[in-house]
């Protein structure tokens, strides 16, 4: 498991390192998928690198490094997108890799102060990026998203997103707007995306989703009216399904897959 306490000093030889090159997690060809490195291995293979503190992985200080793409040797290293590791590695390890990726991206995208343009540096024990000039402190950004399963008796509403990577049907989802509650976001998204009203919104669970930095808030909602009408922009197709008539579904490691499974089990109870 990962502890979020920030290591206080530089990495030691046996400390854990999550290695990325841009969007890809970099693994050793001889290691298991998603396995982190040791700092002495990173230095030997890639040289001394700047590190980002991640926390403690299995009680060992953990860091993240970002490589230049040309440092990755296709004969010795395996680049994997985070999404490709979903369901292939332990959930705790996936969460740790996801946190490392988000912290690297945050530091890469916030090297300069958004208020005055000065260079930033780590502050608040590694939890923030501080501007020495205007003292603005910036913390990693998380985008809250609602993801919800609409139920109608023994049927559930599933939709196919309107983008080229969509190969399955899933639950509805959307970002929470400023000034909006999660419940209000669900009501708005349901109507905007598929033209239906919902009621009896019940919280399920949450999931960190590092693509690139969402916090998914899962809910169930009951159908309350309206004619099913996919918007054609975000949603290509939508329909009502039951346990005996299901389209291709997202993996159970995702909160959408868990919502669907849980909803169907409860309907059959």
Image: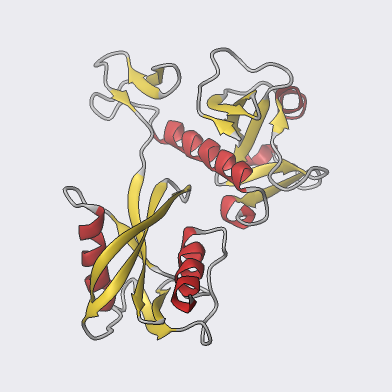
Report whether 233 appears left or right of 31: left
Image side of residue 152 versus residue 22, left or right: left
Above or below 234: residue 34: above
| Above-or-below relation of 31 to 123 | below
Which percent across, then down, holds residue 24? 60, 47
Image quadrant containing the N terminus:
top right
| Residue shown at 27% from the left, 30% from the top | 114
**Residue 12's quadrant in the figure?**
top right
Q: Residue 222: image x %, image y %?
A: 29, 73
Q: Can residue 165 be seen in this view?
A: no
Q: What x and y, as percent, mark residue 47?
A: 70, 24
Instruction: Tell me which residue sits at (66%, 48%) in the image.
Output: 90
**Which picture quadrant has residue 184?**
bottom left
Q: Is residue 7 above or below residue 190?
A: above
What residue is shown at x 57% (from left), y 12% (from top)?
A: 9
Residue at the front extreme, as displayed: 269
Q: In which quarter of the image is residue 185?
A: bottom left
Q: In the image, residue 7 lies at what x, y percent?
A: 55, 18
Instruction: Answer above or below: position of 178 versus 11.
Output: below
Nearer the observer, 172 or 267: 267
**Viewer-side residue, 119 vs 11:** 11
């Amino acid at each position: 498991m990962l502890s979020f306490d920030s290591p206080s000093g530089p990495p030691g030889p046996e400390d854990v390192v999550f290695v990325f090159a841009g969007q890809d997690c970099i693994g050793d060809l001889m290691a298991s998928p998603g396995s982190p490195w040791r700092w002495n291995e990173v230095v030997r293979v890639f040289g001394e690198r700047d590190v980002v503190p991640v926390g403690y992985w299995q009680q060992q200080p953990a860091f993240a490094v970002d490589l230049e793409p040309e440092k990755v040797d296709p004969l010795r290293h395996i680049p994997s997108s985070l999404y490709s590791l979903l369901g292939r590695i332990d959930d705790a390890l996936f969460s740790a890799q996801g946190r490392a990726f988000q912290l690297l991206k945050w530091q890469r995208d916030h090297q300069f102060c958004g208020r005055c343009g000065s260079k930033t540096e780590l502050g608040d024990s590694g939890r923030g990026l501080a501007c020495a000039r205007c003292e603005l402190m910036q913390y990693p950004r998380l985008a809250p998203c609602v993801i919800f399963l609409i139920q109608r008796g023994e049927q559930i509403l599933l939709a196919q997103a309107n983008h080229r990577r969509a190969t399955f049907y899933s639950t509805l989802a959307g970002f929470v707007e400023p000034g909006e509650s999660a419940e209000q976001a669900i009501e708005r998204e349901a109507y905007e995306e598929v033209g239906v009203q919902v009621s009896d919104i019940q919280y399920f669970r949450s999931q960190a989703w590092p693509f690139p930095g969402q916090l998914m808030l899962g809910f169930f909602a009951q159908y309350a009216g309206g004619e099913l009408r996919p918007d054609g922009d975000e949603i290509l197709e939508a329909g009502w399904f039951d346990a005996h008539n299901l389209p291709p579904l997202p993996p159970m490691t995702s909160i959408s897959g868990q919502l669907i499974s849980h909803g169907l089990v409860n309907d059959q109870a």
